[in-house]
Image (cartoon, rainbow, N blue to C red):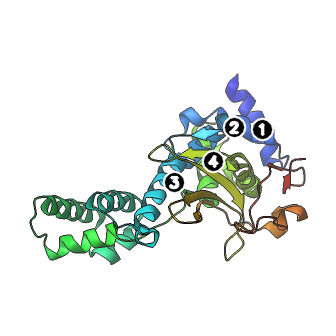
Amino acid sequence: MLDDDLRQRARRLMAGDFRIGDLDRLFLGQRDRAWGRAAFREIGDFVAHRDTREKGLVSQVGKDVFTSVDVWSLKMRGREPSWADIARAAEANLRLASDKQIRSGCGCQRGTAKKRMQAALAKIERQERPTDPEIKALDFLGNRFIWRPAFTSDQLFSEFKDVLTLNQIIAKADAGALDGARPFVALHALSVMHGSTIVLDGGEKARLFAGFANRDRRLEVKVEIVFSELGKPLMAPVCLFLTDFGPDEYCDPELNISTDTVLFNHWDFPIDVGEDNRLLRIC
């Protein structure tokens, strides 16, 4: 019965009849059978629990990004990083860095870089000198800010089609009929992530907010990272969900106007997807 319900909702979606309730049901009804598609599962979890997220893809990447920028910015904040700080940054950056970045920065593959980084830290703890390749790996991974989004709109939509096909909600031959819903799926994700919070290591909470505060004016969700050691807060908003869509086509004109002088081009009010398939302010 549940899958019959989901099939009817998927048919409406393929026919261009875009309803928020249908997407909510499609994500909720399949989040526990997402076939390892982490972005799909994550949006399903946001639909189910929007207030505070302590685990999941966005939370883990958010924690890693926080650790990376936290350690990298210590000297700017008047503190000297300890070896423990460098170690936690190296572990976080190992997860964040792409294979290409690791090959370029460490001169080796990911698995080898991990072994060299861990060997360097162990030798430093024993007051031994690491080898040059070990120092290179530790310096790259432990001494910089590395960022990447948890996922993109392309990844989310690809996984959305995969899950619906694998669960036989739609036939594989019909998957292409969903392509017209690609912007709608991304806008829905923006709206359910906006205003949520994630719990960082140490228990601090960081707010998620949607907007388009980037060079290409692409709609995105950022996490608001704040450091308070200095006279005024140091803010480091970092993108965790990046789309291919811009505000001119996919937002109500009101959302193109920002009232925030610090975090421009983001929204501090609730948003939703309107009947015209554009983001709008909930009044």
Name the spot of residue 137 as percent of width and height, x first. 26, 70
Q: Residue at horizontal 39%, vertical 73%?
A: 101
Identify whether 194 is placed above or below 216: above
Sequence-first tag of 3 and 4: 3
Q: Are marks 1 and 2 in contact (CB under 8 Å)?
A: yes
Q: Marks 3/4: CA distance?
A: 22 Å
What amino acid is labelled 2 in the image?
Leu
Q: Which residue is mark 2?
A: 26
Say the numbered circle drawn on residue 160.
Answer: 4
What amino acid is labelled 3 in the image?
Gly
Q: Which residue is mark 1?
A: 22
Q: Marks 3/2: CA distance?
A: 26 Å
Q: Marks 2/4: CA distance?
A: 9 Å
Left or right relative to 120: residue 236: right
Name the spot of residue 193 as percent of width and height, x first. 67, 48
What amino acid is labelled 1 in the image?
Asp
Q: Which residue is mark 3?
A: 62
Q: Are marks 2 and 4 in contact (CB under 8 Å)?
A: yes
Identify whether 113 is placed above or below 60: below
Q: Are marks 3 and 4 in contact (CB under 8 Å)?
A: no
What amino acid is labelled 4 in the image?
Phe
